[in-house]
Image (tube, rainbow, N blue to C red):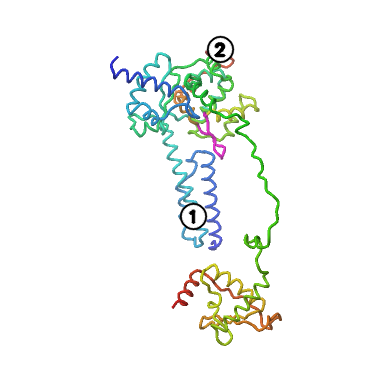
Amino acid sequence: MSKRKATYASKLKRATHLLFYKRHMRPGVKGWELRKALGSDYPKVLKVLDDYLKALDLQVRTVFEEEKTVENPSIEQLDRTRFYITLRGEITPKEAKMVGWRIDDLAGLAITISYIISKRGKAPRKEVEELLREKLPGWKVGLNVDRYVRYGYLNEDENEQIYLDWRTRAEVDQKALIDLLLRTENTNGKSIEDVS
Amino acid sequence: MQSKREREKTGREKLVRIIETCKSVEQRSLDPFLINIDDNIKTAREYLPEWTLPEDLCLDAETIHHIATVVKLQSEWVKHRSTSLYTDPFLLEEKLKKLSKGAIIGTFVKAWHPLIEFEQVTLHSLAEAINYWMNLLPLNERWKETPPIEVKIGSATREELVQQRILQDKTFSEELNSFWQELKTCVQKKGSEGKVHYWDFVGADTYEETVQRAFMASFLITYGYATLEVRMLEEEMFIKPNEKPETRISAKQLVSIPIPVSVEEWKRWKKGEQQ
């Protein structure tokens, strides 16, 4: 193995450790941390890692600070960017159960996120709870919203306005979700297994 | 025809109404285009020449501020509508209400890519943890109760208490009396016509001592051991000791005279005394 290859192999391992293991309260690693650990060519290392992960249906996800994807990010922009490892493809509703979510709770999360996106990223908690109450028992609604906030999917301010938080930005393809929802025909009465 | 007062009242009401409408749009995320900016600006402009009071001008400024916020919201609204993320919230809400839970889940999982993270222990972290454990002191050593410090009971002498400034070596009346005697001596030495300049009496080598002397002098005057003579035109003050303390109530109305004993005053006196 050439010296260059050996260096990259070692950087690849280091990047894997950094990205897979949670080091702070939140998962993921900031660009500047990667630069410090891997050197200034860390975007290249991440690209190689992403190619490796393709076979495992995983990917290196880049979440820019400005929330919008940047075409040719500068070093400064990359430093502030957060990198995560996420699933590349889709999971089935059956698998979602394995991830640790009750199907009701996941549906509630989907509704909440879609509604907030449609309201330009902000909605009063009261309105969200009213919408959830249509299909979830009343006692569960408040608990569920609190749970979504705790997990980092949502954020709530002192005026009881709910916003999308870091986990939604990292895990959910917002545009795809809205497009899919609008295209979905009702499958009322079908069980989750039927859907999957 | 409306009187000026009535017109001002109507104007104020209109501005308050504009502010309230703008606020409701800002706080409840309503469509900002519900507000007619042109009309509101026209109203604000119409009444602007009427305002003379600062409160009314503030109200006008607040109105303009809220109208500007709504214009900003309108711009954001247009930007959002022009993006591919825009969906009519009512349409989406209806859609979400109609869809079954299964359908919603089926759709969501297609756009959801959960994070992958490990929380597994490694050999390295285990080794570090063991090392930490080995160096950790047992709880009974870390949380040792500190025994209360034993203090022997004894008695303090009056001199010790005076030294610690708990007691004074003289009672206040004794101190006041000796200060009165000091004033009398000072008048004999430095004064003329049975009186001495106020600053020549209270002034001392240090500022702290001067303050202390001014404090005592105020009691001498209040309790009738001395009299203060103020010459307004010459801006001079004299202190004159009485032969006996005058305790009778004066026929004249008693007045309080504030005398500033600032560092600057003290420095000025000190300089003058040196010269």
Q: Nearer the viewer, residue A2 or B64?
A: A2
Name which residue type carries label 2: Glu
Q: Residue at x 48, y 74 (%)?
A: B270
Residue B138 is drawn in which quadrant?
Answer: top right
What are the residue bounds of the magenta stretch? A152-164
Where residue B94 sits: x, y (%)? Answer: 55, 26
In the image, is A12 to the left or to the right of A165? left
In the image, B136 versus B199, the foreground residue is: B136
Residue B168 part of the magenta-drawn span: no
Is residue B112 something one can see in this rendering? no
Residue linked to disc 2: A193
Q: Is residue B55 above or below residue A61?
A: below
Of residues A33 and A136, the one nearer the viewer is: A33
| Dot 1 amino acid type | Asp
Q: Measured along the vertical axis of the image, is residue A158 above or below residue B213?
A: above
| Among the 4 quarters of the image, the one containing residue A32 | top left
Work out whether residue B87 can be spotted: yes
Q: Position of residue B246 (x, y in %)?
A: 68, 81
Q: Chain of mark 2?
A: A
Q: Residue at x 55, y 86 (%)?
A: B192
* Vertical placement of residue B251 versus B179, above or below: below
Q: Which mark is residue B60?
A: 1
Q: Which mark is residue A116?
A: none
Q: Are marks 1 and 2 in contact (CB under 8 Å)?
A: no
Label 1 packing within 10 angstroms: few (<14), some (14-19), many (20+) = many
Q: Nearer the viewer, mark 1 or mark 2?
A: 2
